[in-house]
């Protein structure tokens, strides 16, 4: 029973992580970020905290400079 719940949770979470990491990678590359690949890896680590941090850093902090 517990194994079934774990499999269902993984089936739900893994695509979200991959989509988020891919979107951050593509967006960072499009915006000309120097380490876009690192942003992509960072995007796979957590949902949604890495996305929030990416948006704050690239949209708010860098746009002010």
Image (tube, rainbow, N blue to C red):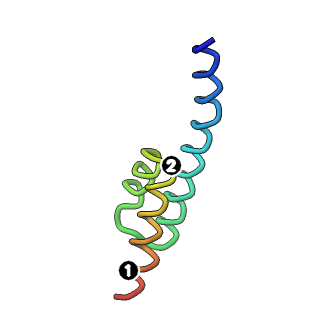
**Residue 13: image location, x then y, percent:** 58, 37
Q: Do the residues bearing badges 1 and 2 touch, measured as CB atoms within 8 Å?
A: no
The answer to which quarter of the image holds residue 3 is top right
What residue is drawn where x is 41% and y is 57%?
A: 39
Neighbour tally class for label 1: few under 14, some 14-19, many 20 plus, Cα within 10 Å: few
Say few, some or many: other residues with alpha carbon within 10 Å of mark 2 (under 14 / 14 to 19 / 20 or more).
Answer: some
Q: Is residue 63 left or right of residue 7?
A: left
Left-right relation of 62 to 52: left
Q: Which residue is mark 1?
A: 62
- Residue 36, percent from left and from top: 41, 60
What residue is at 54 percent from the left and 44 percent from the top? 17
Q: Is residue 15 above or below residue 37?
A: above
* Label 2 residue SS: loop
Residue 17 versus residue 29 in the image, above or below: above
Where does the image place residue 4, in percent across and percent down from the top left?
64, 16
Judged from this view, the residue extending furthest toward the front is 1
Q: Residue at 42% x, 73% y: name it.
A: 58
Calculate the distance from the C-alpha at mark 1 to the C-alpha at mark 2.
22 Å
Quadrant the C terminus occupies: bottom left
Q: Where is the N terminus found, in terms of image quarters?
A: top right
Question: Of label 1 and label 2, which has the lower sequence position?
Answer: 2
Q: How many marks?
A: 2
* Residue 58 position (above or below residue 47): below
- Residue occupied by mark 2: 47
């Amino acid at each position: 029973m517990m194994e079934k719940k774990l499999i269902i949770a993984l089936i739900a979470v893994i695509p979200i992580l991959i989509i988020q990491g891919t979107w951050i990678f593509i967006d960072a590359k499009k915006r000309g970020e120097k380490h876009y690949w690192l942003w992509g890896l960072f995007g796979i680590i957590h949902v949604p905290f890495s996305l929030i941090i990416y948006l704050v850093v690239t949209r708010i902090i860098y746009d002010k400079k």
